[in-house]
Image (cartoon, rainbow, N blue to C red):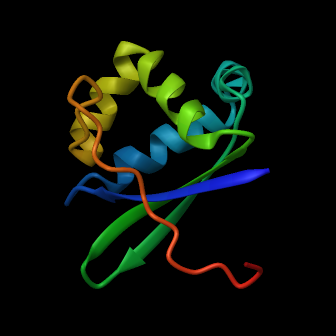
Amino acid sequence: MAILAMCMPILAGKKEKWQAMMDQVANDPNFAASRTDAGVHERSFLQETPAGDFVILTFEGDDPEASFGKIMQNMPKDFAEFAMDVHGLDVNAPPPPMPKLVFDSKA
């Protein structure tokens, strides 16, 4: 099983909105099913820092990069608007480069 991890900023003043959405999707079986349908297990972590707040996402599966692409392509409009408002992420723009693994203690 492969893993993909990425970090996204939570824009200033948007942490409460982000938390409200996380509370909502945590109780939405369709949200979890969308990840299963994409072939990935997703986890989200809140990282609070002096430089601002971030969400750390992990995707585990056979091909997490392809799964992330499927999630982006099939994102509901309301969640896409949320991603733009809270993270500054335009899901309709070309994606940024995928994170690069730089250290693996089991390699």
Among the 4 quarters of the image, the one containing residue 36 = top right
Question: x, y (%) of residue 45?
Answer: 56, 61
* Residue positioned 34% across, 68% down in the render: 53
Question: x, y (%) of residue 101?
Answer: 52, 68
24 and 91: which one is in front?
91
77 and 74: which one is in front?
74
Left/right of residue 46 with respect to residue 1 in the rendered view: left
Question: x, y (%) of residue 43?
Answer: 65, 51
Q: How many marks?
A: 0
Q: Is residue 52 above or below residue 15?
A: below
87 and 25: which one is in front?
87
* Residue positioned 27% across, 52% down in the render: 14
Among the 4 quarters of the image, the one containing residue 66 = top right
* Residue positioned 22% across, 38% down in the render: 85
Q: Residue furthest front?
A: 107
Image quarter of the C terminus: bottom right
Left/right of residue 13 with respect to residue 82 in the rendered view: left
Left/right of residue 58 with respect to residue 6 in the rendered view: right
Q: Is residue 74 above or below residue 98?
A: above
Q: Is residue 97 above or below residue 75?
A: below
Question: x, y (%) of residue 5?
Answer: 54, 59
